Amino acid sequence: IYLLLVLAFVAAVWIDRFDPYRPPAKDLCYFALLFGVSVLVVLTASMARDDLRSALPAAAASLLALVYVVLPSFALTSIRGGDLGWFSVLVLLIIVWVGDISAFFVGRSLGRHKLAPRISPNKSWEGAVASTFTAVAAAVLLYRFYPQVASGLAAAHLIDVSTARPLPAKLWQ
């Protein structure tokens, strides 16, 4: 039942994102309503357990999984619906990849000061700083060369040409 609830929640949010006349406040109201119904369904389903002491922790874990899956999906569709569409999602993924890769390599080669040894013993401050700088540099370069990146992806048939929108002038002013 939990998996079906998560899938229904993601599908409902995803389908509603394509309404071009949707007011901005509707997103938050829609999410709050669906999440409230999900809380009631999960709590009711967890009360059917034989051991009621485990009902609340099981419901909390299910709701955490629901939030962990739905909020990023909701945010991704919101980003996709912005001015740049697919390009914003691409930039987000590239920023994460570049940051993680640079944190790994700089942390392994230059990392001397541990970031949080009890939580993750191999993370270092040097890797975190490298991740931040390279992610910002990647974002600046991608937005600076947006027309070239979009035309290159379109030429390689990796994107649909009709989805390649021009960069808004307000980003350069």
Image: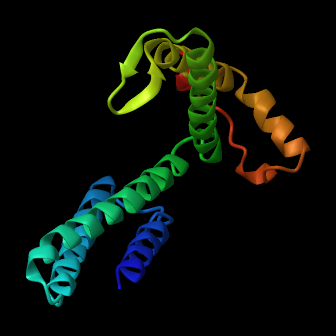
Q: Position of residue 171 (x, y in %)?
A: 54, 23
- Is residue 173 rendered to the left or right of residue 38? right
Q: What residue lies at 60% left-to-right and 18% top-to-bottom? A: 108
Q: Position of residue 126 (x, y in %)?
A: 49, 11
Q: Quadrant of residue 96?
A: top right
Quarter of the picture containing the N terminus is bottom left
Q: Position of residue 70 (x, y in %)?
A: 39, 62
Q: What residue lies at 41% left-to-right and 82% top-to-bottom? A: 4
- Is residue 109 rendered to the left or right of residue 115? right
Colour mode of the rendering: rainbow
- Is residue 85 rendered to the left or right of residue 68? right
Q: Nearer the viewer, residue 48 or 5?
A: 48
Q: Nearer the viewer, residue 163 or 139?
A: 139
Q: What residue lies at 64% left-to-right and 32% top-to-bottom? A: 167
In the picture as drawn, the residue positioned furthest to the left comes out as 53
90, above or below 136, in the image: below
Q: Quadrant of residue 154?
A: top right
Q: Position of residue 104 (x, y in %)?
A: 59, 25
Figure disc tally: 0
- Is residue 29 rendered to the left or right of residue 84? left
Q: Nearer the viewer, residue 28 or 122?
A: 122
124, above or below 3, in the image: above
Q: What residue lies at 77% left-to-right and 32% top-to-bottom? A: 149
In the picture as drawn, the residue positioned furthest to the right comes out as 155
